[in-house]
Image (cartoon, rainbow, N blue to C red):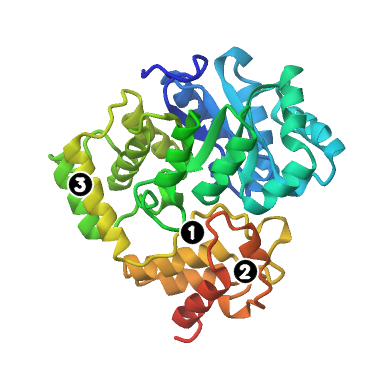
């Protein structure tokens, strides 16, 4: 087990992100989640991450049932977040945090983050003194460590950390495709964290699953790198690919934690295979990752991470399942899936709209952490599937 060099209470450098838990009949599959939590803790790890909006509020209560009620509080760490839609006055922040504590079945959060900070919502957090309020709750013991999660350009993060040097940790999107991406600026954002001496938590290391099911040429590169049958101790090609992506993120010196949102026991097994006895990527492996990154960059895919902010809280008035439609187009473009059109039709039925039904209101773009031109991209989706 790799010792965490930034926070002694964190075991290792791998965390369980609880935004994409296993589901069954519309509810969290708690039996499987318990098995995953057990495997995670048995492997020596202890860091769980959630937020109030994850899985329409079901993530927090699942953590209460599957982790908090089954383990002593000393055996796990829990991170939660203050999210924009859930407060509009300073005096609403404390009751919201107390509600989160109750839902999660704990008396304190080990880490509490100002959620999804960008240039726009930071002004609301600033006006309502959210940082100061959260820090006061840290002094009371309701929060052990105070930080932010971030989705914007490097200069915005530099501004926030300059104005709030009390921030202890920063959660950012980092993966090998986004490392030099001009819209995400993973490398530049990471370098701002280093400039301010802030340890980093990585989210989206496999880019919402985009770095798991790879084009054949990319799969071949990783298979040659690993040798033998091409998967080693992993359960599948997808598990191996996820392992390389997570290790890439964890290989940078200022990384305190890499989160992975796992939705079944095999994904947990594969991630533990990659991270239990963590070794940074070798120069040869980094070369292979660069080659795979080049293959991806030539595909011109939609860089959606399926965070689903665009469709939560009734953001889309037409009930368009935007991330799922983008996934259909990516599958069509990257893997030439014969059935991507069939899945498009399935996704667009039962009260959900097609891409062509978009009324261009722009509500989705205002909450998109990737700052995607969603209205334009939905037109591309419609051109591919609605006019066939």
Residue 84 appears in the rendering? yes
* Residue 150 visible here: no
160 with respect to 225 (left or right): right
- Foreground label between 1 and 2: 1
Numbered circle sitting on residue 288: 3
Q: Is residue 44 above or below residue 178?
A: above
Label pair 1/2, CB-CB below 8 angstroms: no
Estimate the x, y position of residue 159 in percent, counting from the top left: 59, 43
Position of the N terminus, as image quadrant, is: top left
Relative side of 306 to 316, left or right: left
CA neighbours of label 2 inside 10 A, class few (<14), some (14 to 19), many (20+): many
Residue 304's mark?
A: 1
Badge 3 local density, few (<14 within 10 Å), some, or many (20+)? some
Q: Residues within 10 Å of mark 1 (few under 14, many from 20)?
A: many
Residue 192's label in the rendered image is none
Whether residue 9 is situated above or below residue 88 in the rendered picture: above
Residue 117 rendering spot, x and y as whole percentages: 62, 45
- Residue marked by disc 2: 320
> CB atoms at circles 1 and 3 under 8 Å apart?
no
Q: CA distance from mark 1 to mark 2?
A: 15 Å
């Amino acid at each position: 087990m790799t010792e965490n060099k930034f926070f002694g209470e964190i075991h290792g450098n791998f965390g369980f992100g609880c935004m994409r838990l296993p589901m069954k009949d519309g509810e969290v599959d708690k039996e499987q989640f318990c098995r995953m939590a057990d495997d995670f803790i048995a492997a020596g790890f202890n860091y769980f991450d959630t937020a109030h909006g994850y899985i329409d509020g079901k993530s927090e209560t699942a953590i209460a049932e599957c982790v908090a009620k089954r383990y002593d509080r000393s055996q796990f760490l829990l991170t939660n977040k203050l999210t924009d839609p859930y407060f509009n006055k300073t005096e609403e922040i404390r009751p919201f945090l107390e509600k989160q504590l109750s839902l999660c079945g704990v008396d304190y959060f080990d880490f509490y983050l100002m959620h999804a900070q960008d240039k726009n919502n930071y002004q609301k957090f600033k006006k309502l003194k959210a940082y100061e309020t959260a820090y006061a709750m840290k002094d009371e013991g309701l929060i052990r460590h105070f930080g932010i999660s971030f989705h914007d350009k490097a200069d915005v993060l530099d501004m926030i950390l300059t104005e709030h040097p009390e921030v202890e940790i920063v959660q950012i999107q980092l993966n090998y495709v986004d490392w030099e991406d001009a819209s995400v600026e993973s490398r530049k954002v990471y370098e701002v964290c280093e400039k301010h001496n802030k340890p980093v938590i990585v989210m989206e290391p496999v880019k919402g699953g985009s770095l798991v099911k790879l084009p054949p040429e990319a799969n071949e590169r990783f298979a040659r790198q690993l040798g033998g049958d091409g998967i080693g101790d992993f359960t599948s090609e997808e598990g191996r690919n996820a392992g390389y992506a997570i290790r890439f993120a964890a290989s940078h010196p200022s990384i305190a934690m890499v989160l992975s949102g796992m939705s079944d026991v095999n994904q947990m097994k594969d991630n533990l295979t990659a991270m239990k006895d963590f070794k940074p990527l070798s120069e040869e492996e980094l070369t292979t990752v660069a080659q795979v990154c080049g293959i991806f960059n030539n595909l011109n895919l939609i860089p959606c991470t399926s965070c689903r902010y665009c469709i939560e809280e009734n953001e889309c008035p037409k009930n368009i399942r935007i991330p799922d439609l983008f996934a259909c187009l990516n599958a069509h473009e990257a893997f030439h899936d014969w059935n991507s059109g069939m899945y498009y039709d399935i996704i667009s039925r039962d009260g959900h709209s097609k891409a062509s039904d978009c009324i261009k209101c722009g509500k989705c773009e205002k909450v998109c952490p990737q700052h995607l031109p969603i209205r334009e991209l939905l037109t591309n989706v419609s051109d591919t599937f609605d006019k066939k």
